[in-house]
Every structure is written in C-alpha cells, then in structure tokens.
Amino acid sequence: MSDEEKQLQIAAAVTAYQAAKIECAHIDKKIGQICQVFRQVGDSMLRGGTEPKLVDGKLHFSYDRGEFAASLMNEAEFTALIVVRDAARKRLSDAKQMMESLGLGNLS
C-alpha cells in the first residue's frame, strides 16, 4: 500500500470515528434527558406533588415548560432509541479498531 493510500484510509477512519463519537454523545445526552424527565415526574408524584393532567388532549405537568411531556417515550420508542445507541457504539468501536490497525493509538 502506498503512503497516499494509507493517508486516505487514515482520513476515512478518523472521519468515521469522529462522526460515531459525536453520534454517541448526542444519543447518550438524549437518553440522559429522558431518564431525568422520568425521575422528575416520579419524584414529584411520590412527594405528593401535582399529578400530571390532560389539557386539550396533551399531557401537562404544572412545572412543565413543554420539554417534559415531549420527552416521555413509550417502551417501543425507548427500545428503538437504545437500538440506535448500540449501533452507534458499534460504529465507534469499529472505527477505533480501524484507526488502531492503521497505527493510530491513544484514542479517547
């Protein structure tokens, strides 16, 4: 393999790694936000706070500014998000392995 070909492979591997790392971070942040919403809703209801209500057919919380109800997911939606997360983590792992095989180490 020529130096030019190796450089092209390295560039492709670095690009794939960066894209996968960004995607994983985005998905992890979204999952964290969803889990936080469920904790807040549960904590509020357990402490005798205001229960959720339906307002014009939409779920409403007294402290909601629109992001809470929109972040709630059913099992199928959350499962689909976890599938996407796992696929992104696999792409990140594969890209990391490719970079290591090309002599690039110390990745975080």
Image (cartoon, rainbow, N blue to C red):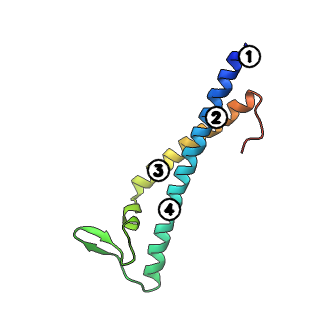
- As drawn, is 21 to the left or to the right of 41? right
Mark-to-mark CA distance, 2 and 4? 27 Å
Mark 2: secondary structure = helix
The answer to whether the residue labelled 2 contacts the one labelled 4, judged by CB atoms less than 8 Å apart, is no
Q: Earlier in the sequence, mark 4 or mark 3?
A: 4
Neighbor class of circle 1 (other Cα within 10 Å; few <14, some 14-19, many 20+) is few
Mark-to-mark CA distance, 4 and 3? 13 Å
Q: Residue lying farthest top?
A: 2
The answer to whether the residue labelled 1 contacts the one labelled 2, judged by CB atoms less than 8 Å apart, is no
Q: Earlier in the sequence, mark 4 or mark 1?
A: 1
Q: Which residue is identified by label 4?
A: 33
Name which residue lies at 53% across and 47% down. Answer: 85
Residue 63 vertical placement versus 66 (above, below): below
Residue 105 vertical placement versus 30 (above, below): above
Residue 70 vertical placement versus 81 (above, below): below
- As drawn, is 63 to the left or to the right of 105? left
Q: Earlier in the sequence, mark 2 or mark 3?
A: 3
Q: Earlier in the sequence, mark 2 or mark 4?
A: 4
**Mark identifier at residue 94:** 2
Q: Quadrant of the C terminus?
A: top right
User: Identity of the amino acid at label 2?
Assistant: Asp
Name which residue lies at 69% across and 22% down. Answer: 7
Mark 1: secondary structure = helix
**Mark identifier at residue 3:** 1
Q: Which residue is identified by label 3?
A: 81
